[in-house]
Structures are given as structure tokens and as C-alpha cells.
Amino acid sequence: MTELSIGFSPCPNDTFIFNALVNGMVSTAGFTLRPEILTDVETLNQWAMEGRLDITKLSFHALMYVRDEYTLLRSGAALGRGCGPLFIQQAGAGRGISSHDPIALPGRYTTAALLLRMARPEFDNFVYLPFERIMPAVISGEAAAGVIIHESRFTYRDSGLEMICDLGAWWEEETGHPIPLGGIAARRSLGRETIQSIETAIVSSINWAFAHDRRQPYIKEHAQEMAAEVSAAHIGLYVNDFSKDLGDEGRTAVEEFWRRGRELM
């Protein structure tokens, strides 16, 4: 049996997807897993550049740089409609954001960072922060605006912020495709048979998750102080049929994202 390292984020969509796999509720064929590593997606992006993990969650932006080393799996992805990053500012700011104003982004290699550059190419002053620090940076004035991801889309109004642009909606209108946010990749060197086994195990883990209560202790353990209703909304938004199989529609969306991204590299 091949022992593989795996990393994903502590966000509810990832813990929902991987709970059964890493905690032994579904079987694996041909591989076992070392204890999982849970950390933010930008750290995982950086680790992918270093080739640290065998199986990893990463942004579709970051995957552009490591495709020689890693292959995108058909299962486990965050991709869909109505779920893209939001470009926000202080409510009632009363002025437009100039091209040189500091914009807070949740990591250099996140999909959110590249998506803003696609939608608003005039901006050129970026501050890269962990995603949970984006809203505080905008509230304090450290940044004139920011791009929020994950559960922040459910809570930003409560913090006195307003949306400038829904970047996911912009992408959907611009391309007609669902927005590809993050995927699961595996080392190409593992070989096709092992990679297919990993894909199958992830689908089994997702099916197990849907068959059980979404308030599983594993999800709650890693959701920190997130309200239960926000966690459930997070799962409902980011885990869907594309998570089980990207399919032709999902892969076409990813390829279009990469095509447009390469034009900005």
C-alpha cells in the first residue's frame, strides 16, 4: 500500500468533502493516508510550488504553475455558479476606487487575485493578506477595498461593508461558464491507477457526507467560531455536482480560466 500525504483547508466545504476519507468511513484501494494537514489555501498554493504534498487542495490560479508536477482530479473541486469572490469596500464610502489605491487580496496565487486582475485590470496596488484579514483591513482603512472569499460573503454586510462587484457574476456573464475556484490535484508520478483510486475515494467520501448530518463534529471542530448556519450555507454553496465530477462543463470552465490567466502572466 502506498502511503500518501494530503492537505486541504479547514473550511467547511473541504472538511465536509474529506471527513469520511481521512477518518476511515470509506475504503481506499491501493493507498493509505498520512494524517491530514489543514491550512489556508494560499499556504497550500505555496506548498504546491514546492511539491510538498502528494494530494492537495489548491487554487485553480496556482495550478497553472504546477501542471508539470500535478494533475487536476475530476473530484473534490469547488466550482459553480453564484459562488465567486466579492469585491467590497466600506459601506457609504462615497467615492470610486482609484487604480493606485491599495486593494487587499487573499493571497498572490488565489483564484480571487487573478479574477480581480481579469475583471479590473486598471488596479496595480495589491496587499496580500490571509483571507480572514481582508475585511478588517478594509474596515480599518489599511486597504481601500478588498476581495473576500469563503464564509465572508455571508457576513460582510454585518461588518459595515458593501459590494462593489460580484466577480463570480462578472465571470459568468463574461464567459458563460461556472467560476472555477479551487481543485484537488495529485502528483502525476503516482500513476494513473493510483490517481483514479484517489478520485473514486473522494467521490465515496462526498456521498457519505451527503448521507449524514452536515453538522458533523469534524466539520465543527475546524470551523472555529463560525455560526452553524453559516457553515451549512458554506457547504451548500461550494459543494455540488461539480465536486463529484468536473465533467466537460467544469473542465471547459477551467481551461478558459487558464487561457485568460496566461494572457496576464
Image (cartoon, grey):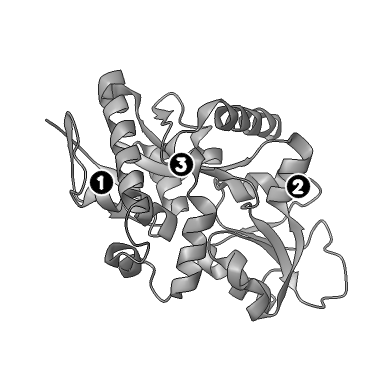
The residue pinned by badge 3 equals 243
Q: Earlier in the sequence, mark 3 or mark 1?
A: 1
Q: Secondary structure at mark 3?
A: helix
Where residue 5 appears, as percent x and y from the top left, is: 24, 41
Q: Amino acid at mark 2?
A: Trp
Q: Residue drawn at (35%, 67%), measured in percent from left and top?
A: 215
Q: Secondary structure at mark 2?
A: helix
Q: In the drawing, what numbered circle is on residue 71?
A: none
Question: Is 126 on the left-hand or right-hand side of 120?
Answer: left
Q: Nearer the viewer, residue 102 or 258?
A: 258
Where residue 162 appears, as percent x and y from the top left, is: 74, 71
Q: How many marks?
A: 3
Q: Amino acid at mark 1?
A: Leu
Quadrant (top left, top right, bottom left, bottom right) of the N terminus: top left
Q: Is residue 157 above or below residue 52?
A: below
Q: Earlier in the sequence, mark 3 or mark 2?
A: 2
Q: In the drawing, what numbered circle is on residue 170?
A: 2
Where residue 250 appears, as percent x and y from the top left, is: 56, 32
Question: Is 137 on the left-hand or right-hand side of 225?
Answer: right
Quadrant (top left, top right, bottom left, bottom right) of the C terminus: top right
The residue pinned by badge 1 equals 21
Q: Residues within 10 Å of mark 3 (few under 14, many from 20)?
A: many
Quarter where residue 121 is shown: top right
Q: Residue drawn at (65%, 52%), measured in percent from left and top?
A: 82
Q: Is residue 195 above or below residue 179?
A: above
Q: CA distance from mark 3 to mark 1?
A: 15 Å
Q: Residue drawn at (53%, 39%), measured in percent from left and top?
A: 60
